[in-house]
Amino acid sequence: MAVKIIEVTDNKHFKDFVNVQFEIYKGNNFWVPPIKKDEIKAIQSSYNPAFRFCKAKFWVAYKDNKCVGRIGAIINEQYNEKTGEKAGRFTRLEFFDDEEVVKNLLQTAEEWLKSEGMTKVLGPLGFTNLDHQGMLVEGFDHLPSAASEYHLPYYKDYMEKLGYQKEIDWIEFRLFLEGIPDKAKRVAEVIKTRNQLTVKSFKKTAELQPFAVKLFEILNEAFKDLFSVVHLDREMIDYYVKRYLMMLNPQFVKLIFDKDNQLVAFIIGLPSLSEGLQKANGRIFPFGWYHIQKALKKPKVVDLMLTGIMPEYQGKGVAAILINELQAVMEKHGVTEVETTGIFETNQKAIQNWKNYENTQHKRKRCWVKSL
């Protein structure tokens, strides 16, 4: 039976769009399920303010009356204005091992992007760099962080077969901690004193709330020149604060202030939610929230989610202070392993930070490109 592609416009298709990945990865020990309701809201203009500067369409594929794949296409007008390109994005591509399915899905997205005047397609990329991005091409037998991606090995093969080439890769590390060396502690103290910096710690999520917007403003400055990044305005910041703040364990967040009590840097670690989300299996209620809260309070592994440093403080050793402070908290909780999220393979400064630890570079995600 031929593949049928249908644009996502009603509740049934929204549900199929999210549910098909649960069928594709059924029984897979390494896939981390998202929360279904959050995933549906993220692709609806009534919930996601990114639709103010993005055009987007989503499709599901059916074969033999079964949903067998999905794809989205996004035109981030703000990013194209920034770069001067006419680049579209494909997003959230998932499919069973069937060339006819993936070929039809990609062609559908490509044809729409081309009809909108785009001259190339990049992906997987989301609405912003805090959305889904990258396709796993190495490290299929490792559990990803909740902020990363997992795909099956055949995805990469089909992308190459269908004419896509590598644009850029993100790499991910697992760090193994063995206590904070005295030298590292001394260096961190010297850097703090020299630059008149202070570190703030937290016990309750409510204590973080007053600084939430400023965190994203720092992120805007620190990441502004990176690939796929767009400036997050206040509405987008509020959207991400509302979506993610309550998921944090505040003990694993560290903020650095200058002599004028201005926030200049931060690091956000998150007790790994991967196993908790696997047990939740896409639902917060009735028992999903319990598994997530248990993971937050009794961490085995910590995921390094975000680090932001104002440009004028980059290269001054501030990253060493942040990592040192976070490691001290992890030691108290008995955490000996850290999972990084994706770092661009070209970002040697960030990669060099992990060379000071016993580590393994175990995963690689790819952004693909194709001319239209």
Image (tube, rainbow, N blue to C red):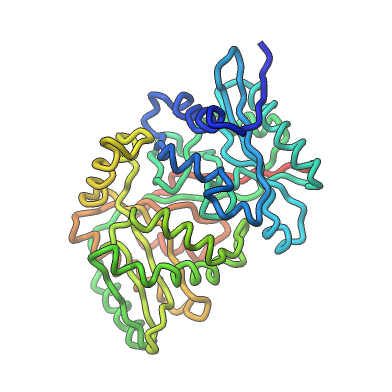
Closer to the camera in the image, 225 or 359: 225
Question: At 74% from the left edge and 37% from the top edge, which residue is drawn?
Answer: 110
The number of numbered badges drawn on the structure is 0
Relative placement, left or right, of 144 versus 331 is right
Image height of 114 relative to 50, above or below? above
User: In the rendering, at what x and y percent does residue 92 appear?
Assistant: 57, 39
User: In the rendering, at what x and y percent does residue 213 appear?
Assistant: 45, 69
Question: At 69% from the left edge and 27% from the top edge, which residue is drawn?
Answer: 103
* Quadrant of image for the C terminus: top right
Relative placement, left or right, of 212 versus 347 is left
Image height of 246 relative to 40, above or below? below
Question: At 60% from the left edge and 41% from the top edge, which residue is drawn?
Answer: 91
Question: At 45% from the left edge and 43% from the top edge, which residue is drawn?
Answer: 38
* Quadrant of image for the N terminus: top right
Relative placement, left or right, of 337 versus 32 is left
Q: Quadrant of residue 84?
A: bottom right
Image height of 95 relative to 334, above or below? above
User: In the rendering, at what x and y percent does residue 215 appear?
Assistant: 44, 69
Closer to the camera in the image, 14 or 328: 14
User: In the rendering, at what x and y percent does residue 32 appear?
Assistant: 40, 37
